[in-house]
Image (cartoon, rainbow, N blue to C red):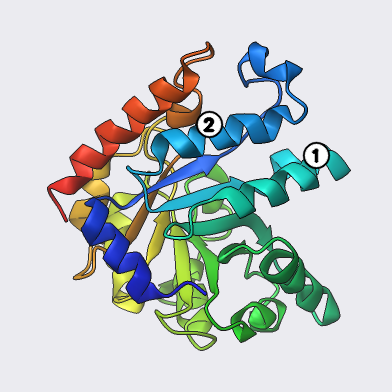
Amino acid sequence: MYTRAKLIAQIRSKKSFLCVGLDTDIQKIPKHLLDQPDPIFAFNKAIIDATSEFCVSYKINTAFFEAMGAQGWESMKKTFDYIPKDCLSIADAKRGDIGNTSDQYAKAFFETLGADSVTLAPYMGNDSIAPFFKYNGKFGIVLALTSNPGSADYEQQKIGDEFLFEKVLKNTCQLGTPENLMFVVGATKPQEFEIIRKHAQDHFLLVPGVGAQGGSLTEVVKFGRNADIGLLINASRSIIYASSGKDFAEAAALEAKILQEAMAVYC
């Protein structure tokens, strides 16, 4: 069971609101790990060991594991099990479907894999993600305003006087509370955080895009922070692929530490 209070306590204790993204690509991990029985898990384990003192969350991008079939699912399960219990574990799966299908997705990620939270795609409507909010001590993290250029195709279109992403925010807030509902908001659109906060004042926001994608930590904090910080800043490639050599874990730790120290002034 993972609670909002526990997350806030970790942020205050570690003086960090960093989420390390495990977008683990077999083509990009250091070559010397390929001799390991499970190279993907060996890489993830080393990254977690090196960065856990600097972050409060880990986000597993499930696509990189699912692409490897049964072995990938085994590596993903081992990684979820290895994430320290004081850190929020996120399955970045972007699930959402109707009826029993959504029930099974929720069971897969919350029961079978043991994730604390999962990212959700809300565009089939509230009934497509409602099953994820039936689990005590688990979070649904709903896509609100993403950082990709294609967000302009739908999310940023206006319906009447509001953007579509605003309607998603307001409607989704009927499913949960800040105790079990978060939103994904891209770091490359910092000014829009003011609109986000109008509808989700107390919710945590998972913010990808800082680091390799060019988002600004300073801008995100300026526009998106609330009384409890209310942000999980995700950095993936800039940390986990900081080095392709045998020093990859040490290099990851250094990058995570740099971000943690930049966050500490706000905690």
5 sits to left or right of 58:
left
Q: Residue furthest right?
A: 70
Q: CA distance from mark 1 to mark 2?
A: 22 Å
The residue at which mark 1 appears reads as 67
Q: Which mark is residue 46?
A: 2
In the rendered image, residue 126, in percent from the top left (x then y), is placed at 64, 82
178 sits to left or right of 259:
right
In the rendered image, residue 36, in percent from the top left (x then y), is placed at 73, 23
Classify 10 Å Cα crowding around label 2: few (below 14), some (14-19), many (20 and above): some
Res. 203 visible in picture: no
Q: Amino acid at mark 1?
A: Ala
In the rendered image, residue 47, in percent from the top left (x then y), is placed at 50, 33
Q: Nearer the viewer, mark 1 or mark 2?
A: 2
Res. 187 visible in picture: yes
Q: Which mark is residue 13?
A: none
Element type at mark 2:
helix
Q: Residue furthest bottom?
A: 174
Classify 10 Å Cα crowding around label 1: few (below 14), some (14-19), many (20 and above): few
Q: Is residue 59 above or below residue 26?
A: below
Q: Residue at x 26, y 31 (%)?
A: 258
137 sits to left or right of 100:
left
